[in-house]
Amino acid sequence: MEMVYRILWVEDDDNWYRAAHKTIEYLIEDDLGFKLHVTRAKGRDELPVPSIWRTYDIVFMDLSLVAPNDGSDGDGGDIIRSIRDHEVYTDVIFYSQSGPKVVRGRARDLELDGVFCAGRDDNAFYDKVKDVIGNTIRKVQDINALRGLVVAEAGDVDALLYEVIDLHYKKLEGDEAAKFRGEFFRRLEEDAAGAAKELAKLSDAALDAIVGSRLTTANHLWRATVRISSARTGLSEEVIELIKNYQEQVQRPRNELAHCVAMYDERTGVTTLINKRDPDKNTEFTDEWCRDMRRKLVQHRNALVALRETLA
């Protein structure tokens, strides 16, 4: 789930497309709170390469299309068949001026799965789109997806904060530049002074107060857990090694996801996570990367549960 909602829209009528696009844009951006990205094609010959078809959240497909330039026969149903033949099972809204009954018959003839049929009448089309898109969003709109969405957007906003400060400072000269830098540094000093005071209060505090302090980071918790696991008997070497690698395999990727900017290449369908602070740590956000990350999360959770059981 991300802030951009991507539609592959195959429609050859310019006037109808422009009018319908405005309605869909209002639904996606003003009502549902996403940014709309539409890739439009007038027929088969204008379709993007098959490797990026699965990157779309939904497909809008007109039944009747102008004959493709390659001389082949075919309509919207044949294009959907091609999409399914490439093992892309994205939901499709299949529509026609002739009405949903005709479209449904064509979908049945081609044995198309995951197809929602609609007429081209403005109200009927909009109602179908609203229902289906709402359903596609609800399917991924759980708390974990929302956490990911917030992390991703916060990363983008953080990057903008850096850019705004950098661009502003480069326009300043002399005393103005010195004043801006000085104010920024004084804020850091104030925060550090506050942290020092809090740290002094914790010198004689109970452990739970220290662990619960805002000064305690996830890195502190990890280091303490490494010491605990190394001293425990009954833990396998594999579990101990996993805990030692937690910072590199879980915490670091988590922090990078929180602060990176996602750049999507429409030509290749690949999203790259851009690390503004260290370009050498840019990561391609691929299915393989996601699978590997999920496996690591499960492994580390199991390792920590195993450690907890030795302490119970």
Image: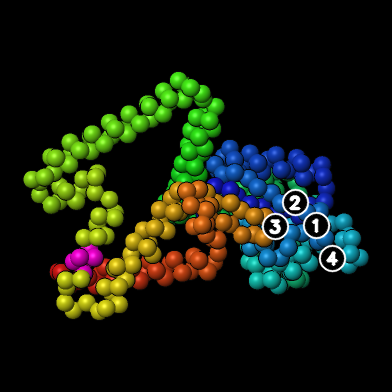
Left/right of residue 228 with respect to residue 2 in the rendered view: left
Helix, strand or loop status at disc 4: loop
Instruction: Specify which label sits upstream in the sequence, 4 or 3.
Output: 4
Q: Tag 3: residue type? A: Arg
Helix, strand or loop status at disc 1: helix
Query: Residue 74 bears which disc, if any?
Result: 4
To which residue does mark 1 refer?
Answer: 46
To which residue does mark 2 refer?
Answer: 40
Asked if residue 192 is positioned above or below residue 69 in the image, the reply reads above
Image quadrant where one finds the C terminus? bottom left
Q: Quadrant of residue 35?
A: top right
Q: Quadrant of residue 118?
A: bottom right
Instruction: Specify which label sits upstream in the sequence, 2 or 1.
Output: 2
Residue range (magenta): 225-229
Q: CA distance from mark 4 to mark 3?
A: 25 Å
Expressed as whole percent of the image width and height from the top left, the position of residue 112 reads 70, 69
Graded by Cα atoms within 10 Å as few (under 14), some (14 to 19) or many (20 or more), the crowding at tag 1 reads few
| Residue at the outermost right position | 71
Instruction: Specify which label sits upstream in the sequence, 4 or 2.
Output: 2
Which circle, 4 or 3, is nearer the viewer?
3
Q: Mark 4 and 3 residues: CB-CB less than 8 Å, in contact? A: no
Predominant SS of the magenta segment: helix
Q: Mark 2 and 1 residues: CB-CB less than 8 Å, in contact? A: yes
Q: Tag 1: residue type? A: Glu
Q: CA distance from mark 4 to mark 1?
A: 14 Å
Instruction: Specify which label sits upstream in the sequence, 2 or 3.
Output: 2
Residue drawn at the location 67% of the way across and 55% of the way down: 266
Q: CA distance from mark 4 to mark 2?
A: 18 Å
Query: Residue 267 bears which disc, if any?
Result: 3
Left/right of residue 114 with respect to residue 103 in the rendered view: left
Asked if residue 10 is positioned above or below residue 157 in the image, the reply reads below
Expressed as whole percent of the image width and height from the top left, the position of residue 94 reads 72, 58
